[in-house]
């Protein structure tokens, strides 16, 4: 048996499992009393965060708004944790209907899933201690200690493009990085600005940490959908409405505003057409 | 993409062999460390001094029943971050040494028990004879008990070594750039090749672990004490 046959069988098994799940939950895209399963992060304060029995953050607020526009009330939403490495699989296997989880639209992901949006333009930035003045951007990092999450895009970019003399710590979560930053063992934490803003906006870190505010990449957060989805137009219309009514702005301010974060106003807020997201030609 | 195209894409983009080499190095150093520490612990547990026996037993029970991930996190977030104890100036070495030490500490508990099971294969008459010719505890252990006990514990020691080789993936928690961390980056950047990625890493560990198993089976036959 060659590999493609093997892969075919694995996919068939996955599809079978997915059908089982569908049959059990009686799920569909209709909104008459059915629930909608939305994948979010559980461990990112300010974006997707499980706070006791509550789910808070910008991603969850956008998800609630979109779900409402699609005809689902708040108690019809079933939140599911979508860790970074599992996101594509969860969509392909039908474990979730859509994903709002700081999910950057990328070429390799577009091969297996579709994206609506983007609903936010983020960019990679640095989080430092409040009194730090010598780190002003990616070019001032030579010889500094930097923290990011294992396997993330951000860490690799710094080492490849900017400074090879940067010493890198890779942790399991950004919260662990902030622990090391507060203790002074690393000089900066790097990832998308809005994620850093979420960390900086928590009660313990307010006034202790600040964003450098010199973004050096462009990440487009999309809404992950199964391949071939017909929901892009509806979701994009919901995002446009959210921006027009000011609910989008309000959600940003409420969730990450306390860190003093200002989003990139050249790109935000997004204005969307009805098509699914694609990767712009480089 | 075909099987070979996917494979070459992954190997061209990522230093897969380098990542596995880190695991092999971790296994090597942690194996030496845990063997030395484990032997001392085994000696303590069979010694005639009650306080040493108690300390050895306490170590084994405490360490063996704590998840390795927790020990690793404790070393990095607790010792390195809070007590600010650096073991080397370069981060790369600092974390490697931390990971090797934690792996050694953890597996020493299992090595100790493996050696103790070997000690139980040595007939009690051997120890009695050694004492009868006037050897005290240390010479008895050193010249009579341990040589026989080690030969009897090769199979359980081999099992511990195999577990250690696979447990080196936990070092990713301690920020060591090894295979499982690289797998995370691969899934992040090449999520469309996910089946291939799993295949590569599963095969990598099979290639590392199978020889250990074959070697210990061979050695346990070859070195067995004929009774």
Image (cartoon, coloured by chain):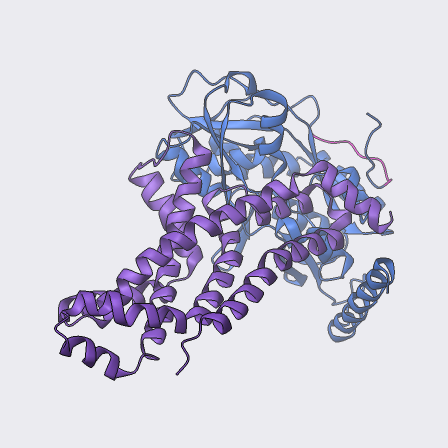
Chain colours: A blue, B purple
Left/right placement of residue A138 relative to residue B38 reads right
Measuring 42% from the left and 58% from the top, which residue is drawn there? B68
Quarter of the image for residue A21 reads: bottom right
Measuring 77% from the left and 46% from the top, which residue is drawn there? B7
Q: Would residue B167 be counted in the magenta stretch?
A: no
Kindly report the secondary structure that dominates the magenta region of the rendered protein: loop
Measuring 63% from the left and 48% from the top, which residue is drawn there? B183
Looking at the picture, how far across and down is residue A240, in whole percent? 76, 37
Looking at the picture, how far across and down is residue A234, in whole percent? 82, 47
Q: Which is nearer the eye, B57 or A29?
A: B57
Q: Is residue A67 visible?
A: no
Read off the magenta span.
Answer: A269-275
Is A210 situated above or below B113? above
Is A54 situated above or below B12? below
Q: Which is nearer the eye, A144 or B9?
A: B9
Looking at the picture, how far across and down is residue A70, in whole percent? 77, 53
Give the mark count: 0
Q: Which is nearer the eye, B207 or B11?
A: B207
Left/right placement of residue A219 relative to residue A159 reads right
Measuring 46% from the left and 35% from the top, which residue is drawn there? B92
Q: Which is nearer the eye, A32 or B196?
A: B196
Q: Is residue A154 visible?
A: yes
Looking at the picture, how far across and down is residue B24, in whole percent? 53, 49
Quarter of the image for residue A233 reads: top right
């Amino acid at each position: 048996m060659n590999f493609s046959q093997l892969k075919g069988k694995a996919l068939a098994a996955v599809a079978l499992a997915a059908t089982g799940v569908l049959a059990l939950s009686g799920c569909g895209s209709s909104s008459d009393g059915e629930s909608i399963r939305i994948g979010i992060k559980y461990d990112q304060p300010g974006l997707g965060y499980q706070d006791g029995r509550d789910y808070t953050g910008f991603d969850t607020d956008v998800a609630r708004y979109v779900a409402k526009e699609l005809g689902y009330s708040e108690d019809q939403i079933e939140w599911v944790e979508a860790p970074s490495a599992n996101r594509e699989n969860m969509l392909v296997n039908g474990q979730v209907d859509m994903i709002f989880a700081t999910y950057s639209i990328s070429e390799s992901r577009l091969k297996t899933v579709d994206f609506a949006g983007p609903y936010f333009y983020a960019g990679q930035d640095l989080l430092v201690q409040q009194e730090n003045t010598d780190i002003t951007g990616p070019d001032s990092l030579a010889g500094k200690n930097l923290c990011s999450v294992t396997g993330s895009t951000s860490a690799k970019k710094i080492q490849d493009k900017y400074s090879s003399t940067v010493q890198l710590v890779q942790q399991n979560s950004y919260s662990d990085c902030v622990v090391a930053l507060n203790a002074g063992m690393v000089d900066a934490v790097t990832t998308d600005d809005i994620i850093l803003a979420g960390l900086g906006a928590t009660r313990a870190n307010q006034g202790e940490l600040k964003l450098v505010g010199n973004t050096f990449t462009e990440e487009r957060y999309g809404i992950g959908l199964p391949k071939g989805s017909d929901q892009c137009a509806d979701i994009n219309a919901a995002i446009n409405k959210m921006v027009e009514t000011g609910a989008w702005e309000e959600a940003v301010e409420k969730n990450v505003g306390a860190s003093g974060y200002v989003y990139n106003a050249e790109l935000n807020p997004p204005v969307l057409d009805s098509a699914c997201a694609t990767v712009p030609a480089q | 993409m075909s099987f070979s195209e996917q494979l070459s894409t992954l190997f061209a983009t990522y230093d897969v062999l380098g990542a596995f080499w880190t695991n092999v190095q971790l296994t090597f150093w942690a194996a030496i460390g845990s063997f030395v520490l484990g032997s001392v612990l085994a000696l303590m547990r069979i010694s005639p001094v009650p306080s040493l026996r108690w300390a050895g037993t306490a170590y084994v029970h405490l360490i063996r029943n704590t998840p390795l991930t927790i020990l690793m996190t404790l070393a990095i977030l607790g010792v390195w971050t809070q007590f600010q104890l650096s073991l080397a100036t370069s981060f790369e070495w600092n974390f490697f040494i931390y990971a090797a030490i934690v792996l050694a500490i953890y597996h020493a508990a299992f090595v100790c028990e493996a050696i103790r099971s070997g000690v139980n294969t040595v007939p009690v008459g051997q120890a009695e004879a050694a004492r009868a010719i006037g050897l005290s505890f240390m010479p008895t252990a050193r010249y009579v008990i341990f040589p026989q006990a080690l030969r009897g514990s090769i199979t359980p020691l081999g099992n511990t070594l195999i577990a250690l080789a696979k447990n080196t993936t936990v070092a990713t928690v301690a920020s060591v750039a090894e295979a499982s961390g690289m797998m995370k980056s691969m899934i992040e950047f090449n999520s469309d090749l996910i089946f291939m990625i799993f295949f590569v890493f599963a095969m990598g560990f099979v290639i590392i672990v199978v020889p250990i198993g074959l070697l210990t089976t061979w050695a346990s036959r070859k070195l067995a004490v004929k009774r």
